[in-house]
C-alpha cells in the first residue's frame, strides 16, 4: 500500500494545483516538499524517489527555456501555423472591432464574479428619466397601433411631427450638435417603452439611433459633415436610412455587387472628380421617407484619379434623396408592421467625393467602419424591442389569465395554461436582464461584439416564444385583430426581429461562438497574434509564453470541470447570498466545461471548426446561457436581492442551466472525433446529466406571480407603457387586476348562490338585484360586481367591422377610414 502513497500524493497535488491554477514551479516545489515529508513519515523510499523523478521529468524541460523553446515550442508553433489558417480581413476586422467585458470571464473557466457584481447599477440621469416620463409617455399615449398598422400603414402625421420635434431621432447625437446626448441605457429604455405599444413606432425611432448615418457621422464624419448633418438629423429635418442589403447580398453583406467608379464629370457647372454609382438595394428601413441615404458600395478607381489602388473596397457615402437618378419611395410590407421600408435603386448617379463619410481618407474602409459601430446598435434596438414587447405580454397575459374564466375558473389556474404562463414569466425576466446588461455595457463605453450577438439572438428568440405563448393563452382574443388587440401585431412581426441585423440561424451558428471563442478566450487571440509576428525570435518567445499559459489553462479547466461534475458544483468559493450562492457555483462549473470544450474543439478542428456549425452553435448556446444567467444574477443583486423575485429568477436560472446541459450533451454526443467526445463526457458529466427543466412547482409560483399584483410583478413590468387610456387596452386590462382580485370572494359568493338556485333571475342586472333583495350580497358588493362585469367585458371583448372597413386601404371609402381612425 505504501508504494502507492507517493503517487497518490502526487496526483492530489497535481489536481489541487490545476484546480487553483498554480504556476508550474509552485506545483513542482510543492510536490517535492510533500514527497520529502512523506518519506520522512515512512513511505516507500523507492516509490518516493520515482515519483520525485517523474515530477522532475515533467517540470525541468518545461521550466528551462533553453530546452523548452527549441524542443517543444518550435515544433508546436509549426504545427499550430499549419492547422490554423490565417484570419481573413473580414474576420480580423470583426475581431479587432470588439471589446471584451465580463463575457471574457465566462470563457475563463474561473469567472471573477466580483468584477461583475461591483459594476455600478445602471441608472438614468434626471434628464433621461424626465424624457421617459414626459415626451416618451406622451408619445405612447398618442399611439394607436391599429390606426398605424391597419388604417394608414404608416405613423400618422402628428406622430411623425411629435417624434421629430422632441428629437426622438437624435437620442444618440451629442448635445453640442443639437441632439439629446442620451446614454445607451436611456436609448434602451425609450425603445423598450415604445415597443410595448407599437413595433412600427419603436422600429421607426430605433433605426436612426442605431447603425446608420448618425452613428457613422459621429465616429468618422468630417467636421463639415458633422456640422451640417448632425443638427438636421437630431431634429428630424433629415430622415436617414442606411442601404447595405441587396438581392444578391443578404447575410453575406461583404459580397455587395453595388459599385462606384471614380471619374470626372461636370457637376454644378464645374468639372469635378466624383463617383458614378450603380446600385440595387432592398429591405431598407425608412428608405421610402428618407431624405438622406447612407450607402454602402464597392469603390473602384480604374484611372488612378485619387491614388494607386484600383479596387478600394467597400466605401460609405451619404447621398441626398433628390440626387438625379435615384429611384426611391416604393414600399415593402413587412408582416403587417408597416414601418417605412423599401427598395432603392440608382443608375449612373454622379456624386462628388465629398459625399464619402469621413471624406476621401475613409474610401475603402467602409466594412471596418460598419463593424466598429455595429455592436452598439445591435446591443440596443432589437433586444430593447423584444424586452418591451415581452414585458408587456407577460403582465397583460397574467392579468388576462386571471380575469378570463372558463369552466368556472380563471384560465390561468389550469395547469396547461400555467405552464405557458410560467414560460412567459421566465423568458420575460431573462430578456429584460439580458437587454439591460448589454445596454449597460455600451453605456460603460464598451463595444460589446459578443454580448450584442447573444442579446440579438436570444432576446428575439425568447421574445418570439413569449409572443406565441401569449397568443395561445389569449385564444380568440389574440387572433381577432382590431383596436382592442394588443398582441397580434407583435406576434406577426416577431420574424422581422429574427431576420434583421444578422439573421438568427447564422448568428447562432457562426457568430456567437465563432467570435466569442477567439475574442473572449484568454489565450487564443494572443497566440494567433504571436504566431503572426514577423520577427522569428520574438514570434517564438511570444508564442511560447501564450502557449504554456494556454496549456495550463486547459489542464485546469479539465480538472475543474471534472471536480464540479463530481460534486454537482455543491462546494467551492462563490459570491452571492444564501439563495444565489449555489447558482454562482453552477455557473463556475459550466464555465469550466465550456472552456474545456472550446479548447478541445479548436485544437482538434482548427480552422474547420468554422464549418462545424452545429458544434459551434451548441457551444455558443452554452456561452449565451452563461451570459444570460450572469445578467440575471447581476440584476437581482443590483435590485437588493428581493425575495419576491425568487420564482422568476429560479425559473429562468434553471431553464438556462438546463439549456446549457442540453447544448453540452448535444455537442459531446455529436463530437466529430468520437473517442474524444467520450473522454470529454466523462470529464464534464462524470455522474451523468443532472440538470432538469424548471419543475412544475416552480412553474406554478412563476405563473401565479403574473396573476396577482406584487412588487416583483411591478419590477418585471417596469419600463413599459401601462397607463390605462383609450389607445392602450393592455394597460387598461393590467390596471383591473387589483380590483378583480379584491372582487373575487364576492364573485364566488354570488356564483355559489346562482349555482344553488338561491338566485333565480336569468340576466345579470336582475340577478344582482335579487341577490341584494334576498341578502346574498350587500349593495356595496353589488356595485363591486357591476364594476367587475364592466372590467371583464372590456378585457374579453374583441372588435368587429363592416366589410368596407376591412377592405384594402386603397379600396376603402374615405368615410369608413375616418370612422376607424
Ligand atoms: C424588415 C427588414 C428591414 C431591414 N432593414 C435593413 C436596412 O435598413 N438596411 C439594410 O442594409 N438591410 C436591412 N435589412 C436586411 C437584413 O439585414 C437582411 O435581410 C439580413 O441580413 C438577411 O438577409 P436575407 O434576407 O437576404 O437572407 P439570407 O442571407 O438569404 O439568409 C437566409 C437564411 O440563411 C441563413 N444563413 C445565411 N448564411 C448562413 C451561414 N453562413 N450559416 C448559417 N445560416 C446562414 C440565415 O440565417 C437565414 O436564416 C432588412 C431586412 C428586413 C426583412
Image (tube, rainbow, N blue to C red):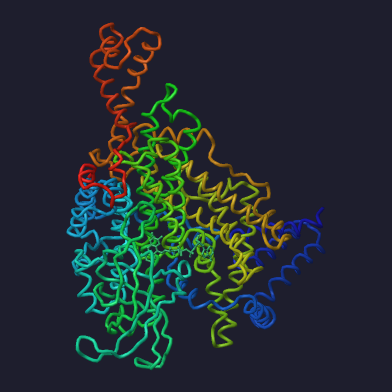
> In the displayed structure, does residue 9 sit left or right of residue 410?
right
Picture quarter with the C terminus: top left
Residue 474 image position (x, y, % from top left): 41, 36
> In the displayed structure, does residue 46 sit left or right of residue 657?
right
Q: Nearer the viewer, residue 653 or 187?
A: 187
Quadrant for residue 765, please give it: top left
Quadrant for residue 283, please give it: bottom left
Quadrant for residue 65, please give it: bottom right
Q: Residue at x 59, y 69 (%)?
A: 550
Q: Nearer the viewer, residue 457 or 48?
A: 457
Residue 216 image position (x, y, % from top left): 32, 72
Residue 802 image position (x, y, % from top left): 29, 38
225 w.r.t. 714: above or below: below
Q: What is the number of callouts on the image?
A: 0
Q: Is residue 443 visible?
A: no
> In the displayed structure, does residue 321 sit left or right of residue 754?
left
352 w.r.t. 517: above or below: below
Q: Nearer the viewer, residue 631 or 158?
A: 158
Q: Is residue 710 visible?
A: yes
536 w.r.t. 571: above or below: below
Q: Residue at x 59, y 44 (%)?
A: 691
Residue 741 image position (x, y, % from top left): 34, 26
740 w.r.t. 706: above or below: above
Quarter, ligand 1: bottom left
Amino acid at each position: 500500500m505504501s508504494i502507492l502513497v507517493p503517487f497518490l500524493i502526487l496526483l492530489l497535488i497535481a489536481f489541487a494545483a490545476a484546480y487553483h491554477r498554480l504556476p508550474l514551479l509552485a506545483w513542482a516545489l510543492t510536490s517535492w516538499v510533500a514527497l520529502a515529508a512523506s518519506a520522512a513519515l515512512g513511505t516507500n523510499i523507492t516509490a518516493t524517489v520515482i515519483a520525485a523523478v517523474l515530477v522532475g521529468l515533467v517540470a525541468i524541460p518545461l521550466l528551462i527555456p533553453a530546452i523548452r523553446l527549441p524542443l517543444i515550442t518550435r515544433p508546436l508553433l509549426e504545427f499550430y501555423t499549419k492547422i490554423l489558417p490565417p484570419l481573413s480581413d473580414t474576420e480580423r476586422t470583426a475581431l479587432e472591432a470588439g471589446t471584451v467585458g465580463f463575457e471574457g470571464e465566462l470563457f475563463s473557466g474561473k469567472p471573477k464574479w466580483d468584477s461583475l457584481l461591483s459594476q455600478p447599477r445602471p441608472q438614468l440621469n434626471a434628464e433621461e428619466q424626465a424624457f421617459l416620463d414626459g415626451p416618451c409617455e406622451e408619445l405612447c399615449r398618442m399611439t394607436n397601433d391599429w390606426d398605424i398598422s391597419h388604417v394608414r400603414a404608416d405613423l400618422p402625421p402628428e406622430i411623425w411631427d411629435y417624434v421629430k420635434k422632441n428629437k426622438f431621432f437624435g437620442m444618440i447625437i451629442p448635445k453640442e450638435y443639437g441632439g439629446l446626448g442620451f446614454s445607451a441605457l436611456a436609448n434602451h429604455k425609450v425603445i423598450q417603452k415604445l415597443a410595448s405599444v407599437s413595433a412600427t413606432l419603436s422600429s421607426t425611432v430605433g433605426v436612426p439611433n442605431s447603425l446608420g448615418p448618425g452613428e457613422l457621422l459621429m465616429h468618422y464624419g468630417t467636421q463639415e459633415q458633422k456640422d451640417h448633418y448632425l443638427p438636421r438629423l437630431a431634429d428630424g429635418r433629415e430622415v436617414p436610412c442606411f442601404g447595405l442589403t441587396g438581392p444578391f447580398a443578404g447575410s453575406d453583406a461583404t459580397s455587395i455587387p453595388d459599385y462606384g467608379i471614380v471619374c470626372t464629370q461636370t457637376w454644378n457647372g464645374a468639372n469635378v472628380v466624383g463617383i458614378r454609382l450603380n446600385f440595387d438595394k432592398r429591405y431598407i428601413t425608412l428608405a421610402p421617407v428618407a431624405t438622406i441615404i447612407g450607402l454602402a458600395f464597392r469603390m473602384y478607381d480604374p484611372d488612378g484619379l485619387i491614388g494607386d489602388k484600383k479596387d478600394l473596397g467597400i466605401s460609405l457615402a451619404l447621398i441626398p434623396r433628390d440626387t438625379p437618378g435615384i429611384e426611391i419611395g416604393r414600399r415593402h410590407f413587412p408582416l403587417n408592421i408597416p414601418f417605412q421600408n423599401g427598395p432603392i435603386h440608382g443608375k449612373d448617379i454622379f456624386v462628388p467625393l465629398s459625399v464619402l463619410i469621413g471624406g476621401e481618407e475613409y474610401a475603402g474602409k467602409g466594412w471596418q467602419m460598419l463593424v466598429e459601430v455595429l455592436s452598439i446598435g445591435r446591443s440596443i434596438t432589437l433586444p430593447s424591442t423584444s424586452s418591451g414587447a415581452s414585458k408587456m405580454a407577460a403582465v397583460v397575459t397574467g392579468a388576462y389569465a386571471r380575469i378570463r374564466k372558463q369552466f368556472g375558473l380563471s384560465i390561468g389556474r389550469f395547469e396547461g395554461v400555467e405552464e405557458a404562463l410560467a414560460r412567459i414569466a421566465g423568458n420575460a425576466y431573462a430578456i429584460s436582464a439580458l437587454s439591460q446588461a448589454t445596454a449597460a455595457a455600451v453605456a460603460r463605453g464598451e463595444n460589446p461584439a459578443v454580448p450584442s450577438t447573444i442579446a440579438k439572438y436570444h432576446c428575439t428568440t425568447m421574445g418570439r416564444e413569449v409572443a406565441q405563448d401569449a397568443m395561445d393563452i389569449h385564444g380568440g382574443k389574440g387572433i381577432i385583430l382590431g383596436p382592442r388587440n394588443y398582441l397580434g401585431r407583435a406576434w406577426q412581426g416577431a420574424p422581422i426581429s429574427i431576420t434583421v441585423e444578422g439573421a438568427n440561424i447564422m448568428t447562432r451558428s457562426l457568430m456567437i461562438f465563432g467570435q466569442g471563442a477567439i475574442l473572449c478566450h484568454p489565450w487564443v487571440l494572443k497566440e494567433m497574434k504571436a504566431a503572426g509576428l514577423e520577427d522569428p525570435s520574438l514570434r517564438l518567445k511570444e508564442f511560447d509564453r501564450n502557449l504554456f499559459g494556454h496549456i495550463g489553462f486547459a489542464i485546469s479547466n479539465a480538472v475543474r470541470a471534472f471536480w464540479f461534475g463530481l460534486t454537482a458544483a455543491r462546494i467551492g468559493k462563490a459570491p452571492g447570498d444564501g439563495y444565489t450562492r449555489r447558482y454562482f457555483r453552477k455557473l463556475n462549473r459550466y464555465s469550466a466545461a465550456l472552456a474545456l470544450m472550446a479548447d478541445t474543439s479548436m485544437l482538434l478542428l482548427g480552422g474547420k471548426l468554422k464549418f462545424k456549425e452545429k458544434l459551434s452553435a451548441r457551444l455558443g448556446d452554452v456561452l449565451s446561457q452563461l451570459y444570460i444567467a450572469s445578467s440575471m444574477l447581476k440584476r437581482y443583486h443590483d435590485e437588493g436581492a428581493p425575495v419576491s423575485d425568487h420564482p422568476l429568477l429560479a425559473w429562468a436560472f434553471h431553464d438556462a442551466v438546463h439549456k446549457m446541459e442540453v447544448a453540452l450533451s448535444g455537442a459531446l454526443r455529436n463530437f466529430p472525433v468520437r473517442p474524444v467526445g467520450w473522454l470529454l463526457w466523462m470529464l464534464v458529466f462524470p455522474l451523468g446529466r443532472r440538470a432538469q427543466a424548471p419543475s412544475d412547482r416552480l412553474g406554478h409560483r412563476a405563473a401565479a406571480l403574473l396573476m396577482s399584483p406584487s412588487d416583483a410583478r411591478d419590477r418585471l413590468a417596469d419600463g413599459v407603457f401601462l397607463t390605462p387610456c383609450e389607445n392602450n387596452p393592455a394597460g387598461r386590462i393590467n390596471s383591473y387586476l387589483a380590483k378583480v382580485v379584491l372582487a373575487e370572494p364576492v364573485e364566488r359568493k354570488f356564483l355559489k348562490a346562482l349555482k344553488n338556485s338561491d338566485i333565480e333571475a336569468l340576466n345579470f342586472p336582475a340577478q344582482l338585484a335579487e341577490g341584494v333583495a334576498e341578502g346574498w350580497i350587500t349593495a356595496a358588493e353589488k356595485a363591486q360586481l357591476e364594476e367587475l362585469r364592466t372590467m371583464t367585458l372590456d378585457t374579453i371583448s374583441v372588435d368587429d367591422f363592416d366589410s368596407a372597413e376591412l377592405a384594402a386601404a386603397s379600396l376603402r371609402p374615405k368615410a369608413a377610414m375616418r370612422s376607424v381612425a
